[in-house]
Image (cartoon, rainbow, N blue to C red):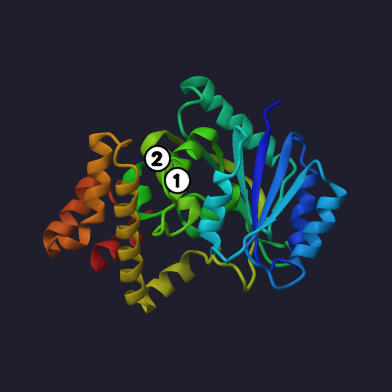
Amino acid sequence: MAMVTIVMTTYNGEKYLKEQIESILTSTYKDFVLYIVDDGSQDNTMKILENYRERYPDKINIYQNEANLGVTLNYLNAICRTTSDYIMLCDQDDVWKKDKIARTLKRIRQIEVQFGKELPIAVFTDANVVDEQLNIINESFFRSGRLNPLRVDLPHLLMENKLIGCTVMINQAVRRILQGSSLPQNARFHDGWLGLIAAAFGKISFIKEPTILYRQHENNIVGDKGFISYIASRVCNLRRQKEALKALYLQAEEFARLYNNLLDNQRLETIVRFSKLNKENFIKRRITLIKYGYLKSGIIRNIGLILIV
C-alpha cells in the first residue's frame, strides 16, 4: 500500500479542528500520516493537537512554526518536509468523506500507470459547500461559482486558479520541483502554485464527485461566495481587481525565474508573456490575452477581464 502524507496547517482553529481530524481518522484508506503544522495559534489549537498526538502517535505528527509564515508559505514549506510518494492538503475546518483518500489516490495512480511516476501530477475534486453546521448550501462548488474545472491548461491557470487546495493530492514529482528551488514570495495561494507546477511540467486531473464538506464561515480566507456575489464584488471594487491582476503578473514572473531551467521554450514564453501583459499597450494587451488564451471561466468573467485588463 502507498503511504499518503496529509498536510494540515492550523491557525486559531479550535472551533472545528476536532471534527476535521475525526473525519480523517475514519477514512477507508488507512495508510496515511497526518502532518499538522501550526502557524502560531493563540487559542487552544495546540492543546487539541497534543491530545490527538498522544492518542494516535503512529498517525499524527505536529510541528509549530517559530514565526508566523502565513497560509501559503506554511503549506509550501510543510510539503517540502514530507517524504511520502503522495501528499494531500487539508484545511482545519472542513469534513472529509470516508473515501476521499482512496478515490483521489486511485486517480493519481491511474495517471502514473499511463505516464510514469516521474511525471508531476495534481488531482483535485469538487466539494459540497456547507454552512457552519454542515448543512448543504450548494451541492457543487464549481457549479455554484460557474467555474470550469476542466480548463486547467497553463494559460488558463495563470489567469484563474481552479484547484481547491483542501481537495488536492500531488505526487512526489511535484514536491521535488518545489524542493528544487527557493520557495516563492509572490505565490498568491499554495494550491495555485502547485497547479502551475503540474500544468507546466505534468498533468492535472479533476474528479467531479465531491470528496469534502467545504465549510463556510466568517473566518474563511478563501471560500465559496457564489457566482452572483462574485460578480457584485468585482463590479463594486475594480481597483481590487486590477491589484489582483498585478499580483498574478508578479506570480508568473517569479515562476519563470525559479523554474527557467526546467521549462521548455513554449511554456516559458507563455509564462513570460503573461507576466509582461501590463507592459503592453491597450490594444496589444487584449490581443495577447486572446491569442495565448489567458482567460477565465465563462463569457461574463471574460468580458469583465477584457474591460479591466
Decide if residue 148 is in sight here: no
- The numbered mark at residue 199 is 2
Q: Residue furthest front?
A: 66
Q: Is residue 120 above or below residue 253?
A: above
Q: x%, y% of residue 101?
A: 68, 39
Q: Is residue 288 above or below residue 82?
A: below
At label 2, counting other C-alpha atoms closer than 10 Å, the crowd grade (few under 14, some 14-19, many 20 or more) is many
- The numbered mark at residue 195 is 1
What's the residue type where badge 2 is placed?
Ala
Q: x%, y% of residue 166?
A: 60, 52
Quadrant of residue 217 within the rendered picture: bottom right
**The residue tagged with tag 1: helix, strand or loop?**
helix
Q: Is 149 in front, or is 285?
A: 285
Q: Is 267 in front, or is 63?
A: 63
What's the residue type where badge 1 is placed?
Gly
Instruction: Give the side of residue 100 with respect to residue 267, left or right.
Output: right
